[in-house]
Image: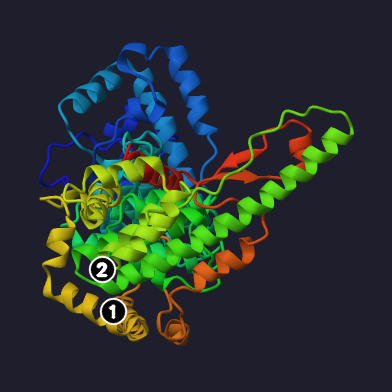
């Protein structure tokens, strides 16, 4: 910042409007206490104060601008002395711009960047007017020097006035960041956090309560977007992404809407978050979730795929066991829901036939299977026979035409020796490369593409397959112990990182990790999946992206009868089948 001792300055003209400007040269300094005050030279422009340009500052324009500024409604919190100084400065601005000689001199000062000395008693009003005029950077730059000048000489409340103007300047800059293209959410939140901090530090939480409430509410509302901004940073930005991951957990499970950012559509938010997470981060997020936070079908399906990708990249077959179980239970839920929907369809169709009506029925829902996904898990666990059965490729199943023709043809075409194992491994290779890995940020970086050959060359995988053949139950227990150990490590990491609280404004209090320790220890990894199955078993929802029966009455009325399920699961399942077309 600049001061009157180091920068060219204009004549000090900020005195009460009652003192005529043409009498200042004749006035005795002892009669004007304002000249005894310390001054701070600031870049203030009367044209900006009145929101007029030199070319358009006609007498009528000045008069209209004066009326608009003097009657403007201000934020609550400015002292009476500040409001009086502000009014005096608006009067002085109108007088200077209405006097040709003074106006010419002031315009020359502005063009040449000369700073204007302002008495300490009028600094609050001057910064308030500069902030109103949009000179936010200048207000923030000169506020510290102004605070130092009013520390001893200015009236009570002068420091609060300057602080309030600086806080408002930060708020306006945060608005600019939020509305930029693309939005700079993190920058905007940090600016709001600074505004709140300086208000509280200078005057306490009770000062300008309306402004502070607005700041806090905005921070809470923007926290979800800030988290996505952190998670979307390059994977090399480990510190920022880790903080975003911690804050994400607080948003999803941290408490009531008063404590965390509001989510109008939680499922849509989770889908957007998943776009920016690695497979391991999605696995951890799914396993860390409390049991009373049920996931929708898309979230479960995506978490199961993440188990596959994470298990492959980290050579952890236990995750493939979990993924196979998740896919199996989703498939069971889809069959149950589809059967119930078909029963509703048949009932309403029979009723319509008896009434002689011909309603516009939608086609009967079919449970879209996740057989390819399950088969891939089984192949990677060395369960070739189970994979063939899952795909309907055993001799008995082929006799009844139970296999998907596209998958059957693909397996046959990729089994040159006649051994189906070759074709099944090709199925796994194609699904991993075309569907699973591209679904996650870290998967897109895998080069060369994943293959079953590389997978089974790993000694750890070979040992797993051998042990699974001998005792699959023991391996499931070992997988549970492994997941518990990883969860305990995450807990300790969370305890260490929560000491300083969240760095995401709006979530500053952080999560009470220690208070949730007992819950973490009793957490069952599949509890959210079971919660989904229990609550949706008879909901008439054909899961995994299939059509949803919304009720027989709507069917009979000829309305749209089936609503497509979640786009994530649906598109992934569709890709699973189309990969072999």
Number of numbered discs on residues: 2
Q: Is residue 373 above or below residue 359?
A: below
Residue at left 38%, top 37%? 179
Element under disc 1: helix
Residue 389: image quadrant is: bottom left
Q: Check if mark 2's residue and mark 1's residue have beta carbons within 8 Å.
A: yes
What percent of the width, then of the height, locates residue 381? 27, 69
> Is residue 222 at least partly visible in the picture?
no
Judging by the rendered image, the residue that carries numbered circle 2 is: 382
Q: Quadrant of residue 450?
A: bottom left
In this rendering, the answer to whether 554 lies above or below 383 is above
Is residue 58 visible to us here? Answer: yes
- Classify residue 313 by image quadrant: bottom left
Residue 115, placed above or below residue 538: above
The image quadrant where one finds the C terminus is: top left
Q: Please, which colouring scheme is shown?
A: rainbow
Residue name at image x 46 percent, y 87 percent: 518
User: Residue 167: x percent and y percent?
Assistant: 38, 52
């Amino acid at each position: 910042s600049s001061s009157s001792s180091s920068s060219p300055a204009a004549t000090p003209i900020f005195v009460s409007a009652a003192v005529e400007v043409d009498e200042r040269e004749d006035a005795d300094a002892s009669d004007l206490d304002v000249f005894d005050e310390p001054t701070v030279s600031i870049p203030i422009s009367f044209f900006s104060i009145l929101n007029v340009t030199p070319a358009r500052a006609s007498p009528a324009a000045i008069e209209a601008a004066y009326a608009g500024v003097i009657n403007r409604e201000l934020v609550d919190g400015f002292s009476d002395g500040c409001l009086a100084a502000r009014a005096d400065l608006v009067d002085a601005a109108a007088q200077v711009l209405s006097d040709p000689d003074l106006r010419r001199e002031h315009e020359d000062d502005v063009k040449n960047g000369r700073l204007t000395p302002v008495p300490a008693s009028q600094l609050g009003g001057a910064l308030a007017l500069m902030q109103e005029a949009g000179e936010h950077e200048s207000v923030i730059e000169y506020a510290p020097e102004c605070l130092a000048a009013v520390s001893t000489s200015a009236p009570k409340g002068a420091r609060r006035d300057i602080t309030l103007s600086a806080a408002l300047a930060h708020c306006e800059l945060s608005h600019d960041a939020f509305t930029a293209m693309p939005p700079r959410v993190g920058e905007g939140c940090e600016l709001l956090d600074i505004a709140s901090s300086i208000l509280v530090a200078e005057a306490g939480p009770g000062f300008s309560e309306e402004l502070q409430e607005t700041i806090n509410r905005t921070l809470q509302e923007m926290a979800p977007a800030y988290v996505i901004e952190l998670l979307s940073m390059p994977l090399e930005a480990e510190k920022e992404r880790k903080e975003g991951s911690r804050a994400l957990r607080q948003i999803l499970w941290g408490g009531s809407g008063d404590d965390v950012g509001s989510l109008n559509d939680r499922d849509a938010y989770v889908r957007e978050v998943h776009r920016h997470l690695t497979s391991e981060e999605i696995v951890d997020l799914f396993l860390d979730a409390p049991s009373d936070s049920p996931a929708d079908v898309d979230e479960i399906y995506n978490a199961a795929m993440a188990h596959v990708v994470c298990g492959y990249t980290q050579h952890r077959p236990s995750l493939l066991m979990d993924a196979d179980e998740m896919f199996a239970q989703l498939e069971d839920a889809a069959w149950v829901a589809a059967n119930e929907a078909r029963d509703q369809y048949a009932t309403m169709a029979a009723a319509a036939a008896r009434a002689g009506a011909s309603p516009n029925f939608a086609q009967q829902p079919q449970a879209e299977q996740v057989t390819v996904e399950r088969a891939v898990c089984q192949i990677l666990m060395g369960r070739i026979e189970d994979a063939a059965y899952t795909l309907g490729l055993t001799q008995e199943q082929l006799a009844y035409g139970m296999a998907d023709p596209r998958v059957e043809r693909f397996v046959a075409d990729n089994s040159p020796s006649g051994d189906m194992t070759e074709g099944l491994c090709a199925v796994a290779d194609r699904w991993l490369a075309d569907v699973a890995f591209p679904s996650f940020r870290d998967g897109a970086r895998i080069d060369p593409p994943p293959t079953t050959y590389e997978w089974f060359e790993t000694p750890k995988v070979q040992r797993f397959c051998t042990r699974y053949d001998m005792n699959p139950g023991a391996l499931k227990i070992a997988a549970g112990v492994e997941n518990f150990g990883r969860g305990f490590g995450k807990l300790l990491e969370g305890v260490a990182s929560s000491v300083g609280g969240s760095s995401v404004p709006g979530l500053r209090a952080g999560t009470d990790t220690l208070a949730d320790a007992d819950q973490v220890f009793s957490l069952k990894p599949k509890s959210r999946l079971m919660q989904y199955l229990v609550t949706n078993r008879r909901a008439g929802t054909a899961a995994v992206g299939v059509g949803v029966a919304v009720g027989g009455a709507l069917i009979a009325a000829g309305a749209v009868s089936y609503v497509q399920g979640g786009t994530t699961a649906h598109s992934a399942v569709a890709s699973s089948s189309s990969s072999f077309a």
